[in-house]
Amino acid sequence: MLRARHYSRRTEQAYGLWVRRYVRFHGRRHPRDLDETHVSAFLTGLAVEGRVSAATQSQAASALLFLYEHVLGRRLRGIEGVTRPKAPVRVPVVLTRAEVDRVLGALSGVNRLIGTLLYGSGLRLLEALQLQVKDVDLVRRELRVRTGKGGKDRVTMLPVVAREPLRTHLAAVRSVWERDRAAGAGGASLPGALHRKIPGAVTDWVWQWVFPATRRYVDDASRAVCRHYWHPSGVQRAVRRAVQAAGISKRATCHTFRHSFATHLLEAGYDIRTVQELLGHTDVRTTMIYTHVLNRDGLGVRSPADMDPGREPGDIGRA
């Protein structure tokens, strides 16, 4: 049912996990024999005993609502009495430009190029890893993000500093692809039923991942021998080590590059609507969180500890 509604594979996995946990929580009873009170008990247990975050509990609730409505054909009539953890409003961690340079300098190889795109193009990690050759325009210096978060496409910039390294990287990837084709492999994982509509596209260069994995596998749909994209955990580990090697005491992750991209553009004077479009945010209020972390000389306010003790209170605003 998830696949029929074109949900992502990651959503399939997450919803399946929550349904299994729900069934085990109630002694392996079938969900059709359970009602709203059982759903409420499970969700409350996640918050009270499991101490999960508000986002995690919300995902579990969405999975169960989908199960009952679309699989079992029964709408849950209000889940009353569910204890919900309070969702905190967090200010994103942002690196300075110097800190970004130090972290990128501590990365190497493919991970360094990926990190450069995360910061220079404002990409989410999976958006960078799922880039295909057809999505890269080296002449116009553009990257096309296909089916990003929320299923939205967008175009963002390709930084000048990444153009030549990316060109060299694509040449190396093409050499690997040509060797794979000579060995009877070189396939690509195509969306939907494209492998049936355009059979030749399976081995077409433009559909290859920009950052392919080192191992090959057999695609379930097309039965072609393909390569998956570069695994996210490898980049995450490399960035974590780079942050430590750079001596940075902030809790910086791959997503911190995207936060830094947005903040540094706003600091440079770019319009918030432009930044919103580059990030792919539906609502500008999501983008406005970055206005809270702009480096404006102490948030634009002078601390009383730095004021001249001989100055009159009325002179503070004129200082």
Image: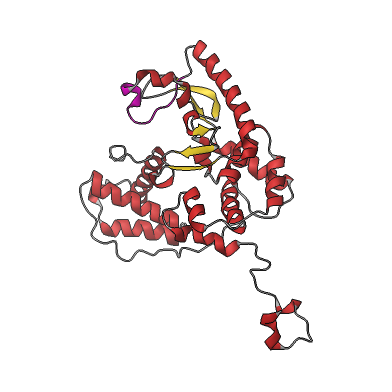
Residue 307 within the segment the image draws in magenta: no
- Which residue lies at the image location 43% right of the left edge and 60% below the top edge? 47
- Residue 44 versus residue 287: which sits nearer the camera? 287
Q: Percent x, y for residue 210?
A: 53, 30
Dividing the picture into quarters, in which one does residue 94 lie?
bottom right
Q: Is residue 166 left or right of residue 34?
A: right
Question: Could one spot residue 143 in this view of the protein?
Answer: yes
Give the tally of numbered discs: 0
Bounds of the magenta segment: 187-197
Residue 193 within the segment the image draws in magenta: yes
**In the image, farthest residue toward the left:** 73
Dividing the picture into quarters, in which one does residue 92 lie?
bottom right
- Residue 141 versus residue 92: which sits nearer the camera? 141
Q: Is residue 226 left or right of residue 36?
A: right
Q: Percent x, y for residue 129?
A: 52, 36
Q: Percent x, y for residue 296?
A: 65, 65
- Which residue lies at the image location 44% right of the left edge and 63% below the top edge? 85
- Which residue lies at the image location 41% right of the left edge and 21% below the top edge? 202
- Quadrant (top left, top right, bottom left, bottom right) of the C terminus: bottom right
- Residue 86 versus residue 185: which sits nearer the camera? 185
- Quadrant (top left, top right, bottom left, bottom right) of the N terminus: top left
Magenta stretch mostly in which secondary structure? loop
Q: Is residue 144 above or below residue 217?
A: below
- Which residue lies at the image location 68% right of the left edge and 42% below the top edge? 104
Question: Could one spot residue 110 in this view of the protein?
Answer: no
Q: Percent x, y for residue 66?
A: 29, 48
